[in-house]
Image (spheres, rainbow, N blue to C red):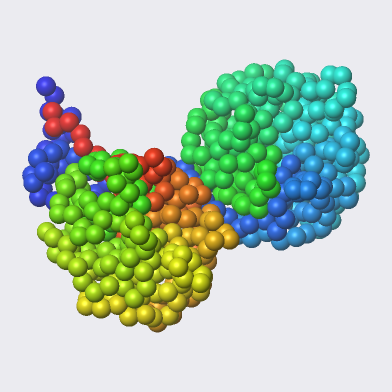
Amino acid sequence: MTKYKEIIGTDIETVTSDPTTTGQVWYNESEGELKTRNQFVGNAWSSGGNMNTARYTLAGAGTQTAALAISGATTPPFARVANVEQYDGSSWTEVGDVNTARDNLAGNGTYTSSLAYGGFAPSATAVTESWSGSSWTEVADLNSARGYLAGVGADNTSGLAIGGDNPGSSPEYLDLVESWNGSSWTEVNDLNTARRYLSGTGTATDALAFGGGAAPAAANTESWNGSAWYEVNDLNTARLALAGAGTAESSLAFAGYTTAGVANTESWNGAIWTETNDINVTRYNLAGCGADNTSALAFGGGPPTVVSTEEWNADIAVGAWVTGASMNSARNALTGNGTQTSALGYGGNNPPVSAYLDLTESYNGTSWAEVNDLNTGRNTLASSGVDNTSALTFGGAISTGQVTNTESWNGSVWTEVNDLNLARQSLGGCGTQTAALAVGGLNPSQPEARRAETESWNGSSWTEVNDLNSRRRQLATVGTTTAALAYGGEDGSTSHLGNTESWNGSAWTEVNDLNDGQNDNIGFGVQTSALSFAGENDPVGTERWNGTSWSKDQDMITGRTNGGGGSSGTVPAGLAFGGGPPVQADTEEWYGDGHVTEKISSS
């Protein structure tokens, strides 16, 4: 058998605790296992600034940091808009409108020099407009009026109008291609496959056309060498109404429609398409632009229409969710505290076994073990605590309604201590065993069922302090009694809140919202560095807080709501467990800095 030293040239280091060096291989003496640590480097979509006007069937031009969003339509109700917006890498600004409002048009060029052509206004149009950086001017029309076409080109002096559709014409789905020379359109060689709702990337002399079709969707990809189209390798996922960005040698294809909207993203290296990380907001009839397959922008789309913008950056260190050991008892509406290597999970709901569980399990980073039960079985309770030796739990629901019960864990048993002032369930909790916060929640017996009350625990009793600004339940809360963060939830009128509030020890202040509102979400971290994950609105969604704003991060492996998490962990290392529906026992470990410890064979 070949030995590690014979391959690598050095022996394996023996350690008593795991190091953090990327790529290092070592033997953990206390665990009796050979391990390696790898840096997860990958591609990621992150949220950019929202557009001013939500729309779909629009056109795009430019790069990730200097883009144009051109015309399109709003819905509901459906209405064509002439609006044009410029993106500077962080925000969109309204600029001069096109002369002809239309949907399903094409565009190409840059932030200061671009073309818009074709579309429906309301019938198929051949209108072409040129952008000078400050205004639009009508120029020579396409030879063939059409919509659902693709466009590529470097600026307003060159371009290709590819494929499309003119309803009522024969044939309806077109293989027509026209080339723009700065003053007029000329028909050139046709596509091999006639289609509409396709996308394209590149220039007038070196281009790629992909996707689209009629019914069903096509995966066909064709490459243009300046004089003819030739078939190359297909997309992995056939789709209509997708977007693209890049060049003929380095492109992205993202989102679109199969039998429903899809989030798939594929990267083209000049020869083949490779599936990579999905876009965060599933959509079709969107616009896209970008320099190549390492830098792109996606914006708009629907239905319903969206204002969201996403930025694609390749080859960056990203976080990762990794499967951990399952709990002994599947359940949802539970809570927990601790870290990735030392956590507790307790309470919850698992009908028909019991809707009000007292079960407690302890996690050591490798496996869950059943330990002594709560004194009062309940679900939708809250928690605080730093590890599996020290915890506090409070509130929740039993068969007769909400409770004030508070229990303290000393590493072996739960002890009843002084109650909350207000009975409630679905509340948030954070802090330690001796210094905790109880935040928001639900009590239907009160005039307003959703609560804003905050109570502070000093190790012996609860004291009411200043309320949240927004009443809500099913929120996530992290931090300490002097520096906390509360986010997500629902208030009875809005199911998925993005509201985020920061606590300074005496008052709550509203700060930047989550990108995607959530309720029944889970959180861990501290006031300046936190994670929000899972929830009813997006069961796999993950967002990261940097102290100022939220950004999208890698999705979970298993979607869930009403789960538990290691709320006192730091963002580089967290834990999620349980949840539903249906009730789950799954555990996932978060490695926020991209480092993941993987067991490997010791042979």
Q: How many marks?
A: 0
Instruction: Please tell me whether residue 401 is drawn above or below residue 366 in the rendered image.
Output: below
430 or 117, which lies in front?
Answer: 430
Left of 538 or right of it: where is 318? left
Q: Is residue 111 placed above or below 282 in the rendered structure?
A: below
- Tell me which residue sits at (88%, 23%) in the image: 169
Residue 179 or residue 408, whichever sits in front: 408
Residue lying at 72% horizontally and 31% vertically, measured from the top left: 197
Instruction: Residue 191: give x, y in percent of width and height.
Output: 74, 21
Look at the image and tell me in which quarter the N terminus lies.
top left
Does residue 457 sit above or below 202 in this rendering? below
In the drawing, does residue 156 fall left or right of residue 375? Answer: right
Residue 573: x percent and y percent? 30, 54
Q: Position of residue 78 (x, y in %)?
A: 79, 46
Q: Residue at x 18, y 54 (%)?
A: 373
Q: Quadrant of residue 212?
A: top right
Q: Foreground: 450 or 151?
A: 450
Give the residue furthest to the front: 400
Would residue 126 appear left or right of 567 to someone viewing this image? right
Viewport quadrant of the C terminus: top left
**In the shown orientation, is residue 135 left or right of residue 153?**
right
On the question of residue 214 being in view, the answer is: yes
Tell me what residue is drawn at x 19 percent, y 68 percent.
416
What is the x, y in percent for residue 576?
32, 49
